[in-house]
Amino acid sequence: MAQLDNVTPLFKDLAKIEHDQNVACHDCSLYRLCLPLGLHNSDLVKLDTIIKRSNNYKRNQPLFSADKQFLSLFVVRSGSFKTTITANDGREQVTGFYFPGEFIGLDAIHQNVYQSNAEALETSSVCELPYEQMQEFGKEMPQLQIQMLTRLSKELSNDKGLMLLLGKKTADEKLASFLLSLSKRFQVRGFSATNFHLSMSRGDIANHLGLAVETVSRLFSRFQDDQLINIAGKSISLRDMEKLEVLCGE
Amino acid sequence: MAQLDNVTPLFKDLAKIEHDQNVACHDCSLYRLCLPLGLHNSDLVKLDTIIKRSNNYKRNQPLFSADKQFLSLFVVRSGSFKTTITANDGREQVTGFYFPGEFIGLDAIHQNVYQSNAEALETSSVCELPYEQMQEFGKEMPQLQIQMLTRLSKELSNDKGLMLLLGKKTADEKLASFLLSLSKRFQVRGFSATNFHLSMSRGDIANHLGLAVETVSRLFSRFQDDQLINIAGKSISLRDMEKLEVLCGE
DNA sequence: TCCTTGCCATGATCCACGTCAAGAAAGAGC
DNA sequence: GCTCTTTCTTGACGTGGATCATGGCAAGGA
């Protein structure tokens, strides 16, 4: 595989942000991306008392699996996760990738079992939010409820976009959309929008986009030939954002 | 096209349930499917004061469109709707079909503009829930907030299932899954699980499932030849639920 | 009754992407 | 360091479902 040239390998590993288990919400570097945004300081302190800050999860380690009892929501603190759902014949669909500040498990709220599987893509950590206690707190903190609704709605909106992607887009468009989506999410987290690390495998990407691994691999090569990106293993650099934007058809 | 035989055309038109504009929540036939479930009677009366009960929408009439200001959520009272999102080159994805008691517009909560387009598939009516007032009420009615979270989570979960369908299933499996999903939804509404009316066009079905109209048409014919269904125009009868269940791979 | 329009069915053809196969890299374990 | 395994790349080939094209049928209008 060609090595990157002309590219400062600036990508940082999202796993390295924050593994410290004892950072309270108001001192957390994710504060402005995360749930507590808009809460009063006193509410924040209360919220802190129910949040469990987990040990690290290793690559491939499950956070939860479908049909296990639903007790908590999770917010990624560092690293990244994927979620999948499984048909009963074993086929899997990767339903999403999750980065620091993002919620996992929202699709389980209406049941008492998780609806999907979640596992770490690299060494990662989460904040665990026991749902029953959250509900109790919600009664006194309308702002918390509103935040929750907002989060859910945002994920819903995003999933509708994925339906458009899966149902109507060509392979090129799918991959371009995926790369730009990652780019934007890294950017709001203070990372480079053009140089980053793909913590998921080609297989995960392909699965998520409804393509074969081979197709993804070929597309990466072609995008590189066409000077749209530089890619070397898991590190990628987006060289022509404009053309990518056009390609993705949104 | 072959006419239905051996099939009592029992299907009723969902449009006919309830067009009366002045039924309060506690008298509404949809009560046990709808939002107010679990609210105290006094809260229910309050809720009634903000709900606007609309006139009828005609077939193809828009309920709202993307980029219009988001002010209200809607609950289908009678009839049915579809929602779509549009890529900037005009391609559309039908993101969902909605029947009485179901919410439309949940994906807009995190923005102040609607994220999708919604239009009536037949003569239909809705209850309109002004979102700001809902939020105010939510502060005093935790049960209302919980209902909202539950609704959102349920739709999210459903959409993840659609991602599996769009990304991994074959044309046969897609159509079988679709028919069974409709069947279940009609059943909980007190209609026949096996004989019903398709208020959406072949085009809408095809679009929603990520197929071409021709494919859907051919599949209907083949399912009929294989004795899985009887279909005549828009009325369908599911003849072999078990085989359909197997086909859909869940 | 005829014409128009929209929706649906079905056959013929084509192509984007999947599948199969074979190496090459890159990690993981020791 | 070396082996073993997994992941990734690339080529050759096959196919499911899209596209194109044609015709039927039902509803509505004049």
Image (cartoon, coloured by chain):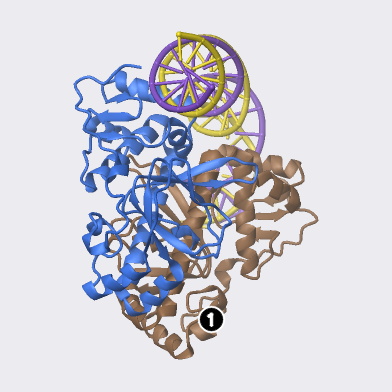
Chain colours: A brown, B blue, C yellow, D purple
View extreme (right): residue: A6
**Mark 1 surroundings: few (<14), some (14-19) or many (≥20) residues within 10 A:** some
- Is residue A46 shown to the viewer in this render? yes
Residue B206 % position (x, y): 46, 33
- Is residue B146 shown to the viewer in this render? no
Question: Residue A224 versus residue A67: which sits nearer the camera?
Answer: A67
Callout 1: SS: loop
Question: Residue A44 versus residue B97: which sits nearer the camera?
Answer: B97
Which quadrant of the rendered structure holds the C terminus of chain B?
top left
Horizontal arrangement in the rendering, residue A224 relative to residue B141 (left or right): right
Horizontal arrangement in the rendering, residue A110 relative to residue A242 (left or right): left
Where on the picture, by quarter, is residue B89?
A: top right
Q: Name the residue under label 1.
A: A28
Q: In this view, does A181 lie above or below A190?
A: above
Q: Which residue is drawn at 65% across and 65% down?
A: A187
Which quadrant of the rendered structure holds the N terminus of chain B?
top left
Q: Residue at x 38, y 43 (%)?
A: B123
Q: Residue at x 68, y 44 (%)?
A: A247
Residue A32 % position (x, y): 56, 77
Q: What residue type is labelled 1?
A: Cys
Residue A99 % position (x, y): 53, 64
Residue A69 % position (x, y): 27, 63
Horizontal arrangement in the rendering, residue A80 relative to residue A133 (left or right): right
Q: Which residue is drawn at 48% across and 53% down?
A: A159
Chain hosting mark 1: A
Where on the picture, by quarter, is residue B15?
A: top left
Question: Residue D3 versus residue A113: which sits nearer the camera?
Answer: A113
Q: In this view, does A210 lie above or below A193?
A: above
